[in-house]
Amino acid sequence: MTQRSGAPARPAEAAPVTSVARALALLDELADAEQGLGVNELARRIRVSPSTASRLLHTLERSGLVQRDGQGPFRLGLRLVALSERVLAHLDLRTLARPVLIELMERTGETATLSLPGEREAITLDSVPSRAGVVSMARLGRPSVAHATAVGKVMLAFGGGPLPRERELRPLTERTITDRGALADEVAAVRARGYGTVFGEREVDVNAIAAPVFDRSGALVAILGLQGPASRLQDPAQLLPALREGAAQLTRALGGGAAP
């Protein structure tokens, strides 16, 4: 087909991976079957041989995406519930947090961030940049450095994970904590006071403060942060009242108790 002059070219669509497409078709069929389905019936419905359907099902079963009792019919697995809960939690969290981030930025004049804690790092999920002429920008999807960011220190203090190993404590600036004992003391202090701060520890010209957000079970589910240029934000703790209120508001919205 000849492309008309001046018309944008359409990107080529990637061909679907056959095995993945068939596995998804199996999940769709099981989603519509309240009593579950056997191998032969599933093979007939997605138009493959019983041996192909059996291999696909056993792969999905090992991943927890389908399950069955003994030699009975296959049903959707419980792992799908856990995956769907994570997706919904992240979507709901971002929606709930957005007005809190906007209010934090407007009250403090600094960039407000929302991060999700992980096993070893926290990831920036959303941010509202400052309107000031000099801005500390937060890149979405950027992982924290646990020992060198306010968000990372909060994750270590309230997330229950282990401290980084000594060899992982890389110096990023001359202020970065690189001694594991010193980091343990800092994390204990963060846990005691309920918030974390950094003074040029990841980037020499950026200071920040962060506070935990908890869900109804009391687990750390998110971290709110405020960051700004060190030349302007010389004492991050001056932003603490607004940050505490924002963390408490989001914690209550998630069904949790008051933030520390």
Image: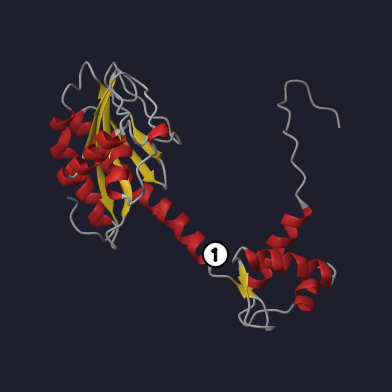
User: Image quarter for residue 148?
Assistant: top left
Q: Is residue 139 above or below residue 212?
A: above
- Coloured how? secondary structure
Q: Residues within 10 Å of mark 1 (few under 14, many from 20)?
A: some
Which of these two is toward me, 130 or 19?
Answer: 19
* Residue 124 in picture, x, y percent from top left: 40, 38
* Residue 51 in picture, x, y percent from top left: 83, 70
Q: Is residue 9 left or right of residue 242?
A: right
User: Image quarter for residue 252?
Assistant: bottom left
Q: Is residue 42 left or right of residue 150?
A: right
* Residue 4 in picture, x, y percent from top left: 79, 25
Residue drawn at 81 percent across, 66 percent down: 52
Q: Is residue 180 left or right of residue 75?
A: left
Mark 1 is on which residue type?
Leu
Q: Is residue 157 above or below residue 87?
A: above
Q: Of helix, strand and loop, which one carries label 1?
A: helix
The quadrant of the rendering that contains the N terminus is top right
User: Image quarter for residue 79?
Assistant: bottom right
Residue drawn at 37 percent across, 24 percent down: 171
Q: Is residue 224 above or below residue 68?
A: above
Which of these two is toward me, 144 or 239?
Answer: 144
Q: Which residue is mark 1?
A: 80
Residue drawn at 17 percent across, 50 percent down: 260
Q: How many marks?
A: 1
Q: Is residue 71 above or below residue 205?
A: below
* Residue 178 in picture, x, y percent from top left: 33, 28
